Image (cartoon, rainbow, N blue to C red):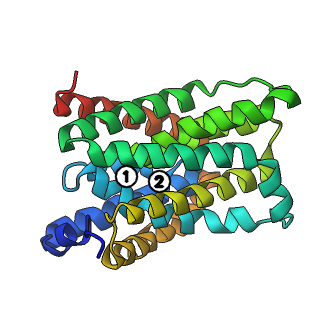
Amino acid sequence: MPHSLLWPTLHAFSGREWLIVVAVLLAGGLVKGVVSIGVPLVAVPLLAGILTVKQAVLLLSLPIVIGNIPQALEGGHTWATIKRIAAPMAGMVLGIVVGVRTLLALSPKTAAGSAGIVLVLAAILLLAAPRFTLPKRLASPIGVVLGFISGVMEGIAAIPGPLLATYLLATGATGKRFTKEIGLILIVSVVALIAAFAQGRHASVSDLVASVLAAVPVVIGIVVARPLRDALPPRAFRIVVLVFVLLAGLNMIRKSGIL
């Protein structure tokens, strides 16, 4: 039988701790609804006070899938899109296996510090928003490498987005094409993430049910935030959120004592 990594902790939570979890998930959904930033970027550092990084990564896995299904299926031509992004997908699946094994082998403090480093790198990448164009002959090999690194980042902190976004933009993906491609990659990657946890007997049915339920406040946040997208300056809001993520990541590193 799989070992339950998440549910025993959630089951022992007080009402106040449950409210914190729901509020954090709702906040992640609100931010994603306004600026399309990943839920784990916001939720991982906020949950670090009451859950281990391993538990937070597992809890956020299915909300990421459910939140990305609509954009992944938008516009049809799904199979053709999957073939076009097969290289980063393959690299990501391999990276996730390495990342999850690394995460499960780390002590709680080292895991928190490693997740903090991933958060800082992700925030810097998104703030810098590097743009370049990849020649077609290099797209596949570079896609595998960046997919692998993104997979390791996801396995350690559930954060694969920044490198993937940079890669897809460099291959000419914009607008709806970009949204569909990154949505499909994230869905496949999180399925691999859950499989990696389950294979190591670190995810029980109760854990997966808890992760499904965690999607409810995230989706509510996304829906509520949609009208705010036009009312707020998204670029300014995005910068504020990323600066918060950067500071939260640095704080996680400081508390872990790994440096």
Name the residue type under label 2.
Val
**Mark identifier at residue 13:** none
Give percent across and percent down for residue 206. Answer: 31, 78
- Which residue: 65% across, 39% down? 165
Q: Residues within 10 Å of mark 1 (few under 14, many from 20)?
A: many
Residue closer to the observer: 23 or 165? 165
The residue lying toward the viewer, choosing from 109 and 64, is 109
Residue labelled with disc 1: 43
Quadrant in the picture for residue 245: top left
Amino acid found under the numbered disc labelled 1: Ala
Horizontally, residue 87 falls left or right of residue 34, namely right
Relative vertical location of residue 250 with respect to residue 24 in this rendering, above or below:
above
Q: Are the residues flagged by discs 2 and 1 in contact, CB closer than 8 Å?
A: yes
Whether residue 235 is visible to the viewer of this picture, yes or no, is: no
Residue 39, label in figure: 2
Circle 2: element type: helix
Seen in the image, is 226 located left or right of residue 84? left
Asked whether 85 or 245 is in front, the reply is 85
Relative to 57, is 5 on the left or the right? Answer: left
- The answer to whether one can see residue 1 in this image is yes
> Distance between the Cα atoms at labels 2 and 1?
6 Å
What residue is rendered at 46% in x and 36% in y? 242
Note whether 123 is above or below 201 in the view shown.
above
Q: Position of residue 254 (x, y in %)?
A: 21, 28
Rendered view: 59 above or below 178: below
Mark 2 burial class by Cα count in 10 Å: few <14, some 14-19, many 20+:
many
The residue located at (52%, 50%) in the rendering is 38
* Residue 37 place in picture, x, y as percent: 54, 47
